[in-house]
Amino acid sequence: MIYFLTLFVMALSIHVKAQPTSKKAAPAKSKTPPAKTPASSQKNAAKFDPYDDPGWTLTWSLTIKGEGIKKNYPSQGEELKWKISRIYNGSTILNFRAPMPARAIKFTPGDPKYTPASFAEALKTESFVKWMHVQQADSSGSPIGVPIHVLINDMLQTTLVVHEEGDVWEHTVDTKEWKADVFASSYDLTSLFIDKANNSYNVEITCFPKENFKKPEKQLRFLHTEQISKSENGHKGEPLHEFNQDSLRMSLTELKVPEVENLIKHAYITLPVDEPLHAKDGVYSFDSGEFVPTKPLISNIPETKTDVKVSVSIRFTKNR
């Protein structure tokens, strides 16, 4: 990011220096009035200001849902229930634009396509523009992140019924739950790429918070509950009903955002192909439909891949 901004500032200085600044000698008087400079030429000659456009507001939602039951798993007489329910929501004001010299979603420092001269040329045409959010700082000078609302309600439950001789039995239900309803900040860039030449767009959205998760109110809550019931026969002198529960806090990073082929990688959302830049009632929108993750979310349960649906929705509008 710093490398990109350095090149951009250097290009901006080249672009500004290239604008005519010296006064030309007054032309000889003529009865024919001088031709007016077209508005488009006046705009191109003006000093480029990355903030002179009101920008965009981009909102997005990532949903991961699935559940299932497995009989006689992992052993005879056991039943396993699982549920995956995770929602990530975010909204970002994109208040800074940067014309790009090459058609590429990913910016690679040191790439020969990206030089101050190539950026300066891009400033003239603005055929491909990258919109970003420029972070503000609080009173202590620390950056103010972009909030992401994280809702998690996952569950893994194992039920075991053991029957012995006669009317002797023991019934155990072991339940693990992961819960969160938190707002946590991300400090990575979310970007909107607009290709004016092809009237299309793409995005790069960070969909997972990247802040310090030491505060309890920003952590994942883990509950482990064990319920045991026993028959009176065969358990004389023992408690027939037991309830044990432990609770602890853990980092949100314990539950990763799953990867989806051509849509989500390393917790970044990028569209598989550029989408047409067409608005309906002033709103540009994209809905991915449902996809499966590239691997199971619970390692020993294959169904947490095949029976989990991942979907992404994106909306963006022009700021007024």
Image (cartoon, grey):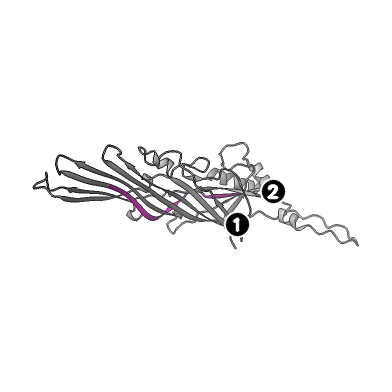
Q: Secondary structure at mark 2?
A: helix
* Amino acid bearing label 2: Thr
Which residue is at the front of the view, 270 or 43? 270
The quadrant holding residue 138 is bottom left
Position of the C terminus, as image quadrant, is bottom right
Which residue is at the front of the view, 12 or 254? 254
Camera sees residue 35: yes
Q: Which of pointers 1 and 2 indicates the residue nearer the eye?
A: 2
Q: Which residue is mark 2?
A: 125
Relative image position of residue 232 (x, y in whole percent):
12, 48
Highlighted magenta segment, given as a residue range: 175-193
Residue at point 38% right, 55% down? 182
Above or below for 146 versus 169: below
Residue at point 25% right, 47% down? 173
Relative image position of residue 300 (x, y in whole percent):
35, 37
Q: Residue furthest front?
A: 166
Q: Which residue is mark 1?
A: 51
